[in-house]
Image (cartoon, helix red, strand yellow):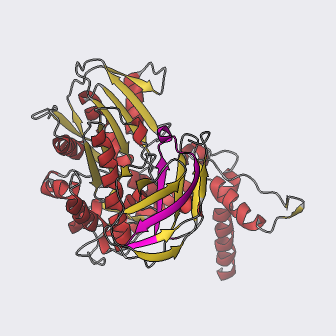
């Protein structure tokens, strides 16, 4: 009897293990469920040689096609997240049904703290963007969006110790110091948090939080705008959060969403072109599908003024679309980490929105903007020695960039580049940004600027860089009319 039980148990065990394999020809493709491209079947031979990574690649191929994979992941995460409240699938389970992105803990505990140089560099970079927009008679505001854990910290697990300051608070202090216009969205969200303005099972704000944030942004710009005060709404449990999808790819828990009864003015999409069903396209852009949403242009036929908007955004910004479209004659929404200031129209407004966890992206690469000319360089500077500088043709302008010593003092964070020779001396203020992609390094101190081709600079130039109270001699450069 005991032997028969062991045989039956072993048979059942192997049958369960074999079930997914037996179901492979019959179940729905994981590509349809997970909305991603599946790993291709690897080859034993690659480039005429034995593929030494075959086992790893085959494992990825097999995992992507394992039947019931999403259901098994959902079941495992249900046990880990809802019953054991342990981190799973890049999600942290908090109290009272709240869940958070795993990366929220970095800003929460300040374990991803940037250097003083980097924080100052961010503030200076944003100030130069603001200067450019104001030079076009436009209005600018910077909108750092707080992580959900920064707003609803009472639901974040107590095992994580909250820091007194982090990159967000340090940046805001620097923006205050430079007089840069910004929205302290952390303060705005905390003041309204009792209204439950973030989703429990999504990393973003809900539409009520968006409406509150929209009004704060427009107030910051100093623009007359619709407030939508007293608008009626329905609160329905029909929202599937991005965090919930990570936990339960085959089905999970719905979240509440506010649906406002607002009659927006008619508009059309200028980008993408040829959109016939405007409302359906807007709903797609506001969802988490993220399909062809890197650049969205609109024209409001109900607006009689010439109010124009250029907005740099991330996933938080998609919920703002209908409010912004309703208040501007034209809008251009660009999802990027590299603002393109040439897209800011004369007299137009610019909103630069970015979530707290991605603040470092502000100085990942220099914006597409011509460097402002300055009349003089700092009066006193120590000799910092020679550095390597690069001049490259970017198509519509020449970029001058390079690395600076890692131990360079913060100073005021300003960096100036002087070109001597050719048809005269020219002084520019550069972005205090280390171009990681271009320099192929991991430095944290650098400069980058683009020269306005309308200046017509040509000839041989000596490059001198002023930063951190020191003066550096750079590599000589030759500019021609073709590159400028």
Give the residue displayed 84% in from the left and 61% down from the top. 44
- Magenta residues, start to end: 443-471
Residue reaching furthest left? 230
Q: Nearer the viewer, residue 248 or 137?
A: 137
Look at the image and say whether residue 363 sits in the magenta stretch.
no
The residue furthest bottom is: 2
User: Would you say residue 463 sits in the magenta stretch?
Assistant: yes
Q: Nearer the viewer, residue 107 or 306?
A: 306
Q: Residue at x 39, y 59 (%)?
A: 358
Q: Quadrant of residue 432?
A: bottom left
Q: Is residue 113 visible?
A: no
| Residue displayed at 27% across by 34% down | 324
- Residue 247 placement, left or right of 380: right
Residue 74 horizontal/vertical position (percent) = 47, 58
Residue 115, position as x, y percentages in the image = 37, 73
In percent of width and height, residue 201 lies at 33, 54
Q: Is residue 70 visible?
A: yes
């Amino acid at each position: 009897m005991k032997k028969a039980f062991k045989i039956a148990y072993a048979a059942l065990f192997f049958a369960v293990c074999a079930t997914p394999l037996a179901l492979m020809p019959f179940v729905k493709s994981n590509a349809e469920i997970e909305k991603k491209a599946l790993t291709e079947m690897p080859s034993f031979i690659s480039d005429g040689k034995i593929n030494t990574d075959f086992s790893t690649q085959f494992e990825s191929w097999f995992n992507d096609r394992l039947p019931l994979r999403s259901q098994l992941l959902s079941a495992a995460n249900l046990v880990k997240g809802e019953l054991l409240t342990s981190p799973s699938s890049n999600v942290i389970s908090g109290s009272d049904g709240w869940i958070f992105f795993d990366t929220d803990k970095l800003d929460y505990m300040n374990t991803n703290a940037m250097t003083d140089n980097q924080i100052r560099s961010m503030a200076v970079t944003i100030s130069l963007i603001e200067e450019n927009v104001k030079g076009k008679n436009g209005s600018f505001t910077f909108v750092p969006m707080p992580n959900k854990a920064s707003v609803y910290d009472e639901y974040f697990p107590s095992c994580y110790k909250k820091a007194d300051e982090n990159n967000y608070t340090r940046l805001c202090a620097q923006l205050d110091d430079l007089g840069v216009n910004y929205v302290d969205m952390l303060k705005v969200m905390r003041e309204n948090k009792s209204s439950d303005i973030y989703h429990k099972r999504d990393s973003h704000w809900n539409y009520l939080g968006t409406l509150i944030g929209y009004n704060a942004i427009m107030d910051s710009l100093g623009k007359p705008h619709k407030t939508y005060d007293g608008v009626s709404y329905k609160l329905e449990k029909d929202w599937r959060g991005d965090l919930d999808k990570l936990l339960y790819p085959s089905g999970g828990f719905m979240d509440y969403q506010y649906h406002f009864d607002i009659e927006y003015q008619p508009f059309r999409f200028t980008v993408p072109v040829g959109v016939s069903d405007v409302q359906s396209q807007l709903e797609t852009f506001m969802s988490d599908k993220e399909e062809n949403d890197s650049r969205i242009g609109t024209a409001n036929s109900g607006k009689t003024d010439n109010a124009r908007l250029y907005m740099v955004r991330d996933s938080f910004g998609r919920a703002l679309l209908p409010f912004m479209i309703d208040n501007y004659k034209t809008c251009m929404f660009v999802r990027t980490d590299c603002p393109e200031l040439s897209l800011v129209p004369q007299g137009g407004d610019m909103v630069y929105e970015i979530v707290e966890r991605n603040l470092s992206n502000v100085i990942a690469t220099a914006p597409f903007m011509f460097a402002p000319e300055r009349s003089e360089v700092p009066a006193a500077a120590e000799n910092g020695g020679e550095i390597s500088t690069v001049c490259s043709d970017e198509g519509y302008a020449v970029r001058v960039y390079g690395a600076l010593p890692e131990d360079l003092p913060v100073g005021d964070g300003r960096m100036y580049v002087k070109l001597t020779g050719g048809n005269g001396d020219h002084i520019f203020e550069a972005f205090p940004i280390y171009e990681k992609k271009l320099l192929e390094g991991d430095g944290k101190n650098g400069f980058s600027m683009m020269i306005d081709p309308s200046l017509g600079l040509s000839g041989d130039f000596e490059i001198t860089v002023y930063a951190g109270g020191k003066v550096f001699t750079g590599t000589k450069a030759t500019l021609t009319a073709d590159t400028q």
